[in-house]
Image (cartoon, rainbow, N blue to C red):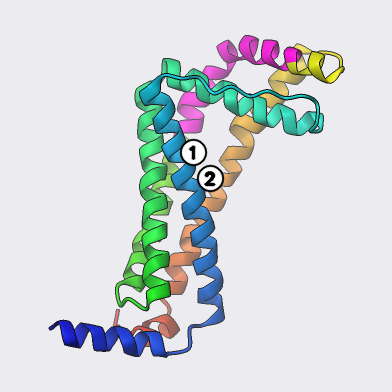
Amino acid sequence: MLGGRNERNRSIGAGRRPRFMTLLTLLMLLLGGRMFITGASDLYRVVTGKAEVLNLDGGLNAENEVILRGQVVLDNALARFRPVTLTLHALARLGLGLLYLFAVAALFSGDARARRACLLAGWTGIAVSAGNALFLVVVVRRMLPWLLPMLSFAMAQDATRAGRPAPEAVMVAEHARLFLVDVPLVVSGMGVLWSLLLIAYFRGRRVRLFYNQAR
């Protein structure tokens, strides 16, 4: 049994891997690593109860500072007031990240389970992306009204350190809605498209022949 499995793995590894498969593998490696790190970071924040501290000295442009500050204020608020929600959200990203990394390891090692692992990652990615969109609409969007005063105060401090005038409340509200809800919703949509691409490619005839799998 083991000899047959090893022989099959060697025959898969001996074939020339399609270039597009290599590209998808590298993208999964990057996405998996990022999801694992961010998911683990959010879990650490919930478990320890320590707020993330971000010191901006004006070295970045104003828009990048707004994005970073807004995310930190949101994450700290979620950890303090919505710990269960943040935990579930982090576990979903952590699990998907691990699944991506497992699929990458299987692809690089020529494991016969690689194709099915990629298909599972694709379907899981759709579920996680849809859940993230729901999280943004149901949780984050509803938090914005009472999150804005904290965000305005933090941004005013950043502006003072950078020698810039404090942003107006209207601008803070617009940036918060754009960078904390609207743009992440677009990213969630792109996550669904990425997952569909994985499913379509690894269900394709060429990949099935490469792995000697009928379906």
Quarter of the image holding residue 106? bottom left
Q: Which residues are magenta?
A: 135-157
Q: Is residue 144 magenta?
A: yes
Give the main secondary structure of the magenta stretch: helix
Q: Mark 1 and 2 residues: CB-CB less than 8 Å, in contact? A: yes
Image x and y of residue 33, in percent: 48, 52
Q: Mark 1 is on which residue type?
A: Ala
Q: Residue at x 35, y 33 (%)?
A: 88
Asked whether the viewer can see residue 55, the reply is: yes
**Position of 176 relative to 108 (above/below):** above
In the foreground, 51 or 168: 51
* Residue 126, above or below 155: below
For the C terminus, the quadrant is bottom left
Label placed on residue 35: none
| 155 vs 41, nearest the viewer | 41
Q: Nearer the viewer, residue 185 or 50?
A: 50
- Disc 2 crowd rating (10 Å Cα; few below 14, some 14-19, many 20+) is many
Looking at the rendered structure, the secondary structure element under dot 2 is: helix
Please give the label number shown on residue 133. Answer: 1
Looking at the image, residue 8 lies above or below residue 163: below
Report the side of 212 relative to 170 (left or right).
left
Q: Is residue 173 located in the magenta-colored stretch of the structure?
A: no
Q: Disc 2 designates what residue?
A: 188
Give whichever of discs 1 and 2 has the lower sequence position: 1
Residue 165: quarter of image: top right
Residue 134: x %, y % from top left? 45, 35
Depth check: 56 or 62 in front?
Answer: 56
Q: Quadrant of the N terminus?
A: bottom left
**Picture quadrant where residue 156 is located:** top right
Q: Is residue 60 left or right of residue 121?
A: right
